[in-house]
Image (tube, grey):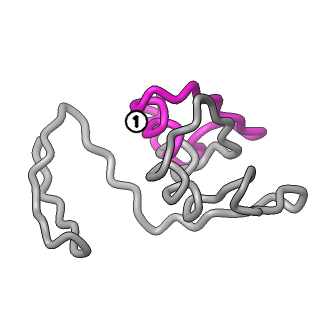
Amino acid sequence: HTVAVSDYDAGEDCLLTADFIVLCTGARPRHPPLCHVDGRIIHDYKTIEEVCAEDLPTSAAILGGGVIACETACHMAEFGVRTKLCASGGFLKETDTLVRD
């Protein structure tokens, strides 16, 4: 399977090819009430990009079992970050079991 991807900020296009391609769109992050995003130690999907662009951490704990949490954990692990994905209610619950497993 191949999908065309456009980076409008950089003005570049590329083709990605893989056995399986999952497009995750329309997700909205939820911040747990006891977890204040301070941009120093605790990050959300916006601030983590800035931190990782400067210097990758050696390890990270990702809270959540939704699409954004799973994507973030996968990306960080691909870059060599020891990643722990923590979810209280399971992972990708609203995703088809064939894809989830």
User: Which quarter shows the N terminus?
Assistant: top left
Dot 1, crowdedness within 10 Å: few (<14), some or many (≥20)?
Answer: few
**Kind of residue sitting beneath label 1:** Val
Q: Is residue 26 above or below residue 73?
A: below
Dot 1 falls on a residue whose secondary structure is: helix
Q: Residue at x 72, y 38 (%)?
A: 87
Q: Position of residue 74 (x, y in %)?
A: 46, 36
Instruction: Pick whichever, 80 or 69, lies toward us.
Output: 80
Q: Quadrant of residue 92?
A: top right
Q: Residue 63 in the image: x percent, y percent?
A: 70, 44
State the extent of the magenta-drawn residues as a range: 72-101
Total numbered labels: 1
x, y percentage for residue 47?
59, 62
Is 11 in the magenta?
A: no
Report the residue at 51% width, 40% height from top.
Answer: 56
Picture coordinates of residue 13, whole percent (x, y): 10, 63
Q: Does residue 86 appear left or right of residue 5 in this picture?
A: right
Q: Is residue 73 one of those drawn in magenta? A: yes
Depth order, front residue of 41/62: 41
Q: Is residue 90 above or below residue 13?
A: above
Residue, x 58% and y 37% (percent of image)?
57
From this viewpoint, which residue is outermost toward the front? 54
Residue sitting farthest toward the right: 34
Question: Going 68% across and 36% down the picture, which residue do you hit?
Answer: 61
Residue placed under numbered mark 1 in the picture: 99
